Amino acid sequence: MFITVLAIILILIVIFQIAKASEYVSVLKGEDRAFKQNNKINGALMIAFLILGLIGVFWCNHELYPKTLFPQGSSSVEGENVDKLLKITILLTGIVFFATQILLFWFSYKYQYKEEKKIHFFSHSSKLELIWTAIPTIVLAILIVYGLRSWFLFTGDAPKNAIQIEVTGHQFGWTFRYPGKDGVFGKKYFKDINATNELGLIWKDSAELSQKADPATFDDIIMGGTVYLIKDKPVRFIINSQDVIHDVGLPQFRMKMDAVPGTPTTLWFTPKYTTEEMKKRTGNPNFVYELSCDQLCGVGHWSMRAVINVVTQAEYDAFMAKQKPAYYSAFPAKDPDNIKAAAAVSDSSKPVKVASPADTTKK
Amino acid sequence: MSHEVVLQADVAGVHGTAHHEEHHHKQSFITKYVFSQDHKIIGKQFLITGIIWAILGGFMSVLFRLQLGFPDTTFPWLETVLGKWGKGGHIAQEAYYSLTTIHGTVMVFFVLTGGLSGTFANFLIPLQIGARDMASPLMNMLSYWFFLLASVVLLSSFFLETGPFSGGWTAYPPLSALGQASDGSKQGMDMWLTALVFFVVSQLLGGLNYISTVLNMRTKGMSMTRMPLSVWGVFLQAVLGVLSFPVLFAGFILLIFDRHFGTSFYLSDIFVAGQILPHEGGNAILYQHLFWFLGHPEVYIVILPAMGLVSEVMSTNARKPIFGYSAMVMSMFAIVILAFLVWAHHMFVTGLNPFLGSVFVLLTLLIAVPSAIKVFNWLTTLWRGNIRFTTGMLFAIGFVSLFISGGLTGIYLGNSAIDIHIHDTYFVIAHFHLVMGVAAFFGMFCGVYHWFPKMFGRFMNSTLGNIHFWVTLIGAYLIFWPMHYEGFAGMPRRYYDYSGWESFKQFISLNKFISIVVIITFTGQFLFVFNFFYSIFKGRKVTNKNPWQSNTLEWTTPIKPLHGNWPGEIPEVYRWPYDYGKDGVDFIPQTTPVGEDESVH
């Protein structure tokens, strides 16, 4: 470390001494000559930078494009619009980028100082200015029209057949709730949250909070860490937060929505590929859809992860059939299985499957 | 000192005369350099404070880039230097988030607002419009001292047990409101808020002064349409600041109430750290509206002065009038107005009403039009010019390049449908660092190299300046260009470690590369720092009042102007400042009356 710092300081001193010496030289051999020489060097560097820069842009694209999400495409039907729009935008801005950067450095090189050169006194031109006000306006209008069409699709109502899942963020993990057999999310209230009732479902009457138990809560299923979706079936997330602002980030599905305490938000999409299919498509046997927190929420922000498992309808049905409402794990005495078991006074082999609130995050 | 003799050989005569003028009025060191009311000294105070902050802010980024680039490597010296923040040779999580937060706060507010517009608004407005000083020199002085006070308070928060604020420079509640949610939101946040409140006071004192000076104190003949674009830039940024900083102030006050006085402006339904909080009915998104009502104009507060400086330096060194002066001014006006109407594009994924969102998409993309006009005008200014690559000019060209690269990606982010995908990813980091971070820094460097002779009566070393320019330009692109790809992969910003993520871990080697370039580029900045401080005392002396053959008024003052700027009458102005190469004359200063046989531009 010490040696590195020393080396850096030495390099800086050498550069400084060279710069200092060049200043003396320029004074001694005449500033005018030194200026012209220096100007030529910078002019050449301008064109060199342009050429190397353009090569760099292509090389960077060659190296990094495969690591983006473009090659695998969107995993949601709606997200395809994002990719399409991105491609149009990249094309249009790309043309402007190359045109303007090439002109900038090429002009700098071409019109570098030459003695006796007369500049072209050109202070304004209404025609030119009109042209380059109109062109960006038209281009932007195209992008706005395309963009807003997708925007209204994404933010519009979810299809009627969408499965509903409630997503709740907390420092630093995610909890998912399915409405259960009745298809209705039971009411919840944050003051009901406790160790056995992590979402604050209104399971009991409470005079203190002047509330009555909501029977719709009794069959709600709660899961932590992993959420199951069905291929080709729209899903609607109802997003909540318990503490600070989080964000449900779904890069493969091209979707994102904040989780705001006190203000539920929603987001919907239609998964196109199961997780298994994605493993084959990407050639990555470890592929998983990840839900990342995209809004800084505290020191564990970076580890606030959940897994999304997209499965077929049959797999989903089989999985859901095994799930037990959270109510029964909080009140095992009310669990019909337990009641039956108690009645039969046998068979205790079936462990009570509880949605564990534990984070999947590793600390 | 034979070197000194070589460099300053032709200065001896000038030196003698300069001494004579200094007998005006005797001032003590304290009143002259510390509690000075001279706008030039205040400008330099802002600049030097800004440079110190930039070094600190840059160093913070080096520290957190160490973590991002080398998550598995231990640096024992970190523990030596940072104590518990560098435990085991790693930047601790808390430290990582504090460093990113304070890096952002410092760079946006203290360097690119205080350091950039504070410096050049103070230094250039009176000199370029022909005034002896600001409208209120006392307010001007207070503006600096509030800025310094803010700096001291913010810096002190590093010495708290619970550390400085760590919830991001935007300080979104509830994270910023609840000490239980994060250690940084304890006293660190109180100090952060105090610092920022002082900063707003400083900005208002300064801004009101800039506006009244520009409106009321222009010399005879200096109509608004004859003002250099550099003055337009700082004038319009002051207008933006005066209209938007109070809104941020209000947002902060409500936050302070929520933190300490039990109100629920931003808080509702919160269960944090095992505790149910009593707050109900507040809305966390309200803060974001208030914050971004300043926050978005803020990026123009940063970039408008840079645009002005670049326009001025570019015209001077292309020996050619700036193309489309009135279009330049009109586009700045358009930017000012639109800047107030686009704030919610930072909030497309907060659950914003979709229709409202679409209005903000429209207005946001509209703001690209005046920006595009400016770029085309700069390009046309270079076209068929006679370009001198002074260091200031190099940075002006670099500014345009970076502004194009960073500006175009704004079109992606402003379009809400795309924004959903790349919001809060590295794409955003790349976008704003290029367009308002590095580009504004380039505007600042451009200004410093160009006006250094006016500030200190000496030149900065141009070889060193050239090396600094190329290192910084190449470094900036190598750092931020690849980040766009990380953004296209959806890689979230503000993560401490990506190695546990199947979706993002393919970028570990790229992150290492970026971190190495960050270290090199940061080190390269010491070429500037050293050049700057060395040249103040030892630089080659300016022997000519107008070393760049420029038209503007500041170059009609003595080489080292005293308080009051012009020893005699303030010169009168007869023309716009961009008569370069007109009728075959290389340059015609603004003080030259219009000749009878002269063509009208």
Image: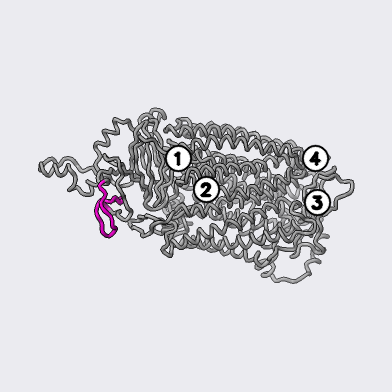
Q: CA distance from mark 4 to mark 1?
A: 55 Å
What x and y, as percent, mark residue B529? 63, 54
Magenta residues span: A195-215
- Determine the chain carrying the residue at label 3: B
| Prevailing secondary structure of the magenta residues | loop
Q: Amino acid at mark 1?
A: Thr
Residue position marked by numbered label 3 in the rendering: B575
Question: Which quarter of the rendering shows the N terminus of chain B?
Answer: bottom right
Q: CA distance from mark 3 to mark 2?
A: 42 Å
Which of B392/A152 is in front? Answer: A152
Q: Amino acid at mark 4?
A: Ile
Q: Nearer the viewer, mark 3 or mark 2?
A: 2
Q: Nearer the viewer, mark 4 or mark 3?
A: 3
- The label shown at residue A119 is 4
Q: Nearer the viewer, mark 2 or mark 1?
A: 1
> Few, some or many C-alpha atoms within 10 Å of disc 1 (few <14, some 14-19, many ≥20)?
some
Residue position marked by numbered label 2 in the rendering: B344
Label 1: which secondary element: helix
First along the sequence among labels 3 and 2: 2
Contact check, label 4 and label 2, Cβ < 8 Å: no
Label 3: which secondary element: loop
Question: Which quarter of the rendering shows the C terminus of chain B?
Answer: top right
- Determine the chain carrying the residue at label 1: A
Q: Nearer the viewer, mark 3 or mark 1?
A: 1
Task: State yes or no: residue B227 in magenta.
Answer: no
Q: CA distance from mark 4 to mark 3?
A: 20 Å
- Determine the chain carrying the residue at label 2: B
Q: Residue at x 66, y 62 (%)?
A: B209
Residue position marked by numbered label 1 in the rendering: A155
